[in-house]
Amino acid sequence: MAELTPSMVAVADGVHAYLQQDGGWYLNNAVLITGPDAAITVDTAATEARTRAYRAAISRVTDVPVRTLVATHHHGDHTHGNHLFPEATVVSHTYCRERVLRDDYHAVLALFTGPSWGDIRPAAPGLTFRDTLTLWSGDRRVELRHPGRAAHTRGDVYAWLPDDRVLISGDLVFNGGTPLLAEGSPGGLARTLEELGELDPEVVVPGHGGPSGPELLLETLEYLTWLRQLARAAHADGLAPLDAARQADLGRWAALREPERLVANIHSGYAEITGTPVDMTRLAADMIELNGGLIHCHA
Ligand SMILES: [Zn+2]
């Protein structure tokens, strides 16, 4: 983890975003919400060393204990470090708990080279919900909501802080990185982003990349419109997802990091058109192929 030093950035009074640049694969953000007697963290980090560094950063901000850990979804960057917060109750959507218990994350790690993961043992959430749950941090409301449909995954949770107008989106939104819909739904995410826009947030803390204003929701929505048009046209032409990705005119999206995710998103777009579930083995193989080999992860 050397050159990309994480930073703790205040986004509201008592709310800090822990930003792990450059926001690439497994370089997620966590958010610390500090109350008078206890703190809440939204997500942890991908590796043991990164989670320990996050804990050290927390201790420089507050000495109250972290009693609640919200998992925005089951992916390892957000959950691998959960066991290093043994004093916290892990809260998630029901589906997130099911996926953590499936304990199949080593198959995903095999797609990547680079990081030293250390001791990672995703801890199963001990408190789950299906729709909404309100946490209280002193007198600050922290509203946890499931979009009600598949979006980035089938078990996404975002946190809305209505008094601060801060939206903690998890991976419903990436800043600077290609959105990832391998286990999600382009249409479901589009509808969800429209609803997030209606909240009228002042600050959006994405799952990866720097905080932004609400324009990041609109930009992601525009990506999804482009992606779904691309998938419809390519499917009508009978193209395999990998060929569709290779032939795509990326236009304004050429600047996004993790370009290999495009083929995963096209698989997901095809699934939306045909109603046939994505073949995850093929999706993973196509992503490696488009990348030209195993994906380097610098977490
Ligand atoms: Zn993530």
Image: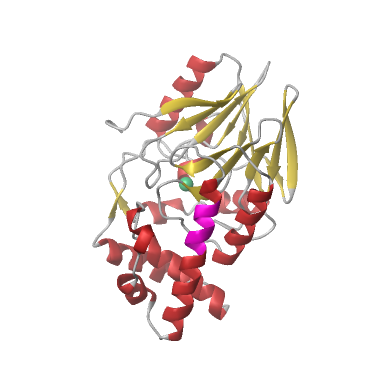
Q: Could you say where residue 131 lies in the image, as x and y percent from the top left?
A: 74, 50
Image quadrant in which you'd find residue 64: top right
Where is residue 147? Give x, y as percent.
67, 54
Q: Identify the magenta region.
A: 218-224
Residue located 62% across and 44% down the image: 158
**Residue closest to the far left:** 292
Residue nearer the viewer, 221 or 293:
221
Report the residue at 45% width, 51% height from top. Answer: 105
Question: At 60% across and 58% down in the image, what residue appears?
Answer: 154
Q: Quadrant of the C terminus?
A: top left
Is residue 237 at least partly visible in the picture? yes
Vertical relation: 264 (above or below) 240: above
Residue drawn at x 63%, y 56% is 194
In the rendered image, residue 223 lying in the magenta stretch gets the answer yes
**52 to 298, vertically: above or below:** above
Q: Nearer the viewer, residue 154 or 151?
A: 151
Q: Is residue 127 left or right of residue 226?
A: right
For this rendering, which residue is in front, 272 or 221?
221
Q: Is residue 122 visible?
A: no
Check residue 153 for magenta coloring: no
